Image: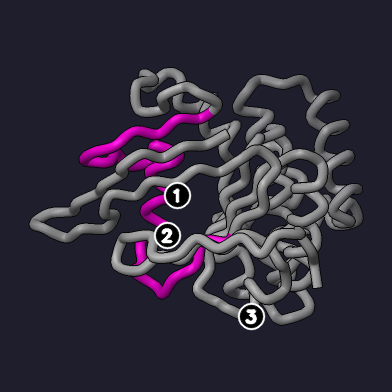
């Protein structure tokens, strides 16, 4: 599904953010990417979505070299490889419906199709009763559900979750992780970046550890399980 070969990212003047990263993620995997702040997790996500360019290396998504695609095709890749963030990045003065509908509006979908798709995804995430609420008034867990719905509305094949539970209480954290597990069971690959060991302990799955821009450990306990 996703193969990284010898990815290196150096920021001026000589700050090595990623140091020769090679990694393979299979379809339908649920993977934790862990490490302290500054380990390179967020930079790696930006490279995967080509929000930034590496100095060296190659990235293959379904056997296509992402780094060889022209700019006009980047939107397609970013729809297939969605991302959600710790700080939500929502339009706080807009309703839940408006936030989730925005990607489909940009693609020029009809009002009927947008309403159907938004309702379907919000029913699944149990936030359809919040559709007309301004996002600024939501709880942290509700906001992250809106982010997840906005990502899922474009039917991605991979979701990158960058510290998705960083601003959530333990109950909301468990709920978001449970939803991500359900999404993975429907065939979407999930990669979660976190520095919180308690989050990792929720789920028995593959854990990749980063430090100073390098992968220092890649462990897979075997059976995927939500505790």
Disc 3 or disc 1, which is closer to the eye? 3
Residue at image position (51%, 30%) is 61
For marks 3 and 1, the one nearer the N-term is: 1
- Circle 2 — which element? helix
What x and y, as percent, mark residue 64? Answer: 47, 22
State the CA–CA distance, disc 1 to disc 2. Answer: 6 Å
Which residue is identified by label 2?
Answer: 41
Magenta-colored stretch includes residue 59: yes
State the CA–CA distance, disc 3 to disc 1. Answer: 22 Å
- Residue 71: mark: none
Q: 65 above or below 128?
A: above
Residue at image position (66%, 28%) is 105
State left or right for residue 196 relative to residue 214.
right
Residues at badges 1 and 2 in contact (C-beta under 8 Å)?
yes
Q: Residues within 10 Å of mark 3 (few under 14, many from 20)?
A: few
Q: Is residue 87 visible in this depiction of the protein? A: no
What x and y, as percent, mark residue 15? Answer: 17, 60
Q: Could you tell me which quadrant the C terminus lies in?
A: bottom right
- Circle 3 — which element? helix
Q: Is residue 146 visible in this depiction of the protein? A: yes
Which residue is identified by label 1?
Answer: 45
Which residue is identified by label 3?
Answer: 198
What x and y, as percent, mark residue 118? Answer: 81, 39
Residues at badges 2 and 3 in contact (C-beta under 8 Å)?
no
Residue 219, picture quadrant: bottom right
Magenta-colored stretch includes residue 75: no
Q: Which residues are magenta?
A: 32-61
State left or right for residue 81 relative to residue 155.
left
What x and y, as percent, mark residue 44? Answer: 40, 51
Q: Say which of 6 and 86 sits in front.
A: 6
């Amino acid at each position: 599904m996703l193969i990284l070969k010898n990815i290196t990212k150096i920021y001026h003047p000589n700050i090595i953010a990623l140091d020769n990263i090679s990694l393979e993620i299979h379809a339908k995997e649920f993977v934790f990417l862990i490490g302290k702040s500054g380990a390179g997790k967020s930079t790696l996500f930006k490279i995967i979505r080509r929000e930034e360019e590496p100095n060296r290396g190659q990235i293959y998504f379904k056997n296509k070299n992402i780094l060889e695609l022209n700019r006009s095709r980047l939107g397609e890749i970013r729809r297939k490889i969605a991302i959600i963030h710790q700080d939500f990045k929502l339009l706080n003065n807009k309703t839940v419906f408006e936030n989730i509908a925005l990607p489909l509006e940009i693609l020029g979908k009809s009002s009927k199709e947008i309403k159907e798709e938004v309702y379907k995804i919000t029913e699944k995430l149990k936030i359809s009763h919040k559709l007309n609420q301004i996002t600024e008034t939501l709880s942290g867990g509700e906001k992250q559900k809106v982010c997840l719905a906005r990502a899922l509305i474009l039917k991605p094949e991979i979701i990158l979750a960058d510290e998705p539970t960083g601003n959530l209480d333990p109950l909301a954290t468990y709920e978001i992780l449970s939803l991500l597990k359900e999404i993975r069971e429907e065939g979407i690959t999930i990669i979660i970046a976190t520095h919180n060991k308690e989050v990792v302990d929720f789920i028995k799955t593959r854990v990749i550890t980063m430090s100073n821009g390098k992968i220092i450990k890649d462990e897979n306990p075997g059976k995927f399980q939500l505790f």
